[in-house]
Image (tube, helix red, strand yellow):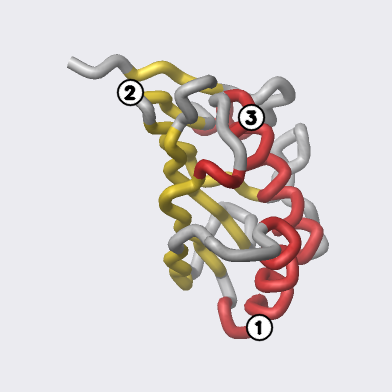
Amino acid sequence: MTQRDAVFPANRHALYEEHGYSAAIRSGDLLFVSGQVGSRSDGSPEPDFTDQVRLAFANLEATLTAGGCTFGDLVDVTTFHTDPESQFESIMAVKRDIFPRAPYPNWTAVGVNWLAGFDFEIKVIARIPDDA
């Protein structure tokens, strides 16, 4: 049976305890990262949408780092959006900063009507490098 090891970033936010989930699970050479949102350390949402997206990516990066990965190790990305049409340009601007050139990760975007007070969430699967 494959072992599952919980992974948490150094400065984990309050949502992990409040909602009872791990930031990520390492299983074999894969890191399965739970949905990351633009939450401040107290678990509250960043109010400005673009800043919320940037903070979600920063929280994701901290979790990837704790698991021995980087954005370059992503193999699957899923994002959730409360208003995709009006949010698209802001998300694309941040995405271009994070992934400035090909090859880009595969990406599935899903419109939803509720994200517990947030407007953007990103979950990923990464392959853990051999040297991690």
Q: Residues within 10 Å of mark 2 (few under 14, many from 20)?
A: few
Could you tell which of marks 1 and 3 lies nearer the N-terminus? Answer: 3
Within the image, what quadrant is residue 100 found in?
A: bottom right
Q: In this rendering, which labeled residue sits more in front, label 1 or label 3?
A: 3
Q: Position of residue 122 (x, y in %)?
A: 54, 53
Residue sticking out furthest to the bottom:
85
The circle drawn on residue 86 is: 1
In this rendering, would 102 be left or right of 126? right
Residue 69 vs residue 130, the one in the foreground: 130
* Image vertical order of residue 6 relative to residue 31, above or below: above
Q: Amino acid at mark 3?
A: Thr
Q: In this rendering, which labeled residue sits more in front, label 2 or label 1?
A: 2
- The residue tagged with tag 1: helix, strand or loop? helix
Residue 121 in sight here: yes
Q: Which residue is mark 3?
A: 65
Q: Are marks 2 and 3 in contact (CB under 8 Å)?
A: no
The circle drawn on residue 73 is: none
* Image vertical order of residue 66 relative to residue 117, above or below: above
Q: Amino acid at mark 2?
A: Gly
Cα–Cα gap, marks 2 and 1? 39 Å
Could you tell which of marks 2 and 3 lies nearer the N-terminus? Answer: 2
Residue in the image at 63% along x and 63% along y: 119
Q: Are marks 2 and 1 in contact (CB under 8 Å)?
A: no
